[in-house]
Each structure stands twice: as structure tokens, then as C-alpha cells.
Amino acid sequence: MERAPDAEAALSGTAAVLCPVGTLIRAGEALAVGDGGMGRWTEKLREALTAIQFGTAPDPDGWLTRVP
């Protein structure tokens, strides 16, 4: 596998929203992803998603369902 110094990877989930991935493992070989922290694009995506979830940004795709 080739390593890019500015690479990013993230996992998404209901509670975690977006969580950075620090290491990928393929065929027993570990590959560090970036510096292991949240990258610039993952952070921007996380901010956009949480803004929609908290109602501070529009929900253009109708993802949210209000629960009384």
C-alpha cells in the first residue's frame, strides 16, 4: 500500500458522528493514516453534519425527523 501524508479516513455512526481512523490493516500489514487524528476534511464534514443535527444549518435532504 502506498502512503499519502495528507490521507484521511473516518468511520461514521449514530453516536460517534465521524471518528478518525488512525491505522488500516491489510493482509497483516499496518498502515498509519495521516497523523492518526482528525484531518481537515473529516473535521469540516463533521462540523457540517453536527450543524444539521443541531438545527443550526438547513437539512436539505430531509434527514431529520422531529420526535415530540
Image (tube, grey):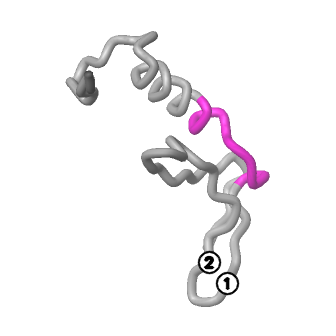
Amino acid beneath label 1 = Glu
In the image, taking residue 36 as reference, residue 25 lies left or right, namely: left
Q: Residue furthest right?
A: 35
Q: Which residue is drawn at the image coordinates 51% and 31% (left, top)?
A: 45
Instruction: Report the side of 10 relative to 13 (left or right).
Output: right
Is 36 a magenta residue?
yes
Residue at point 75% right, 54% down? 36
Magenta residues (range): 34-43
Q: Please, what secondary structure does the residue beneath circle 1 have?
A: strand
Spatial CA distance of label 2 from label 1 is 5 Å
Looking at the image, residue 56 lies above or below residue 43: above
Q: Is residue 39 left or right of residue 57?
A: right
Residue drawn at point x = 61 percent, y = 33 percent: 43
Which label is found at residue 25?
A: 2
Q: Position of residue 50 (x, y in %)?
A: 49, 26
Q: Residue 44's image quarter?
A: top right
Q: Which residue is the site of mark 1? A: 29
In contact (CB < 8 Å): disc 2 and disc 1: yes
Is 46 inside the magenta-drawn segment? no
Q: Taken as a whole, is the magenta stretch helix, strand or loop?
A: loop
Tell which of 18 and 33 is nearer to you. Answer: 18
Q: Could you tell me the amino acid type at mark 2?
A: Ile
- CA neighbours of label 1 inside 10 A, class few (<14), some (14 to 19), many (20+): few
Q: Nearer the viewer, residue 38 or 64?
A: 64
Residue at position x 43%, y 46% in the image: 14
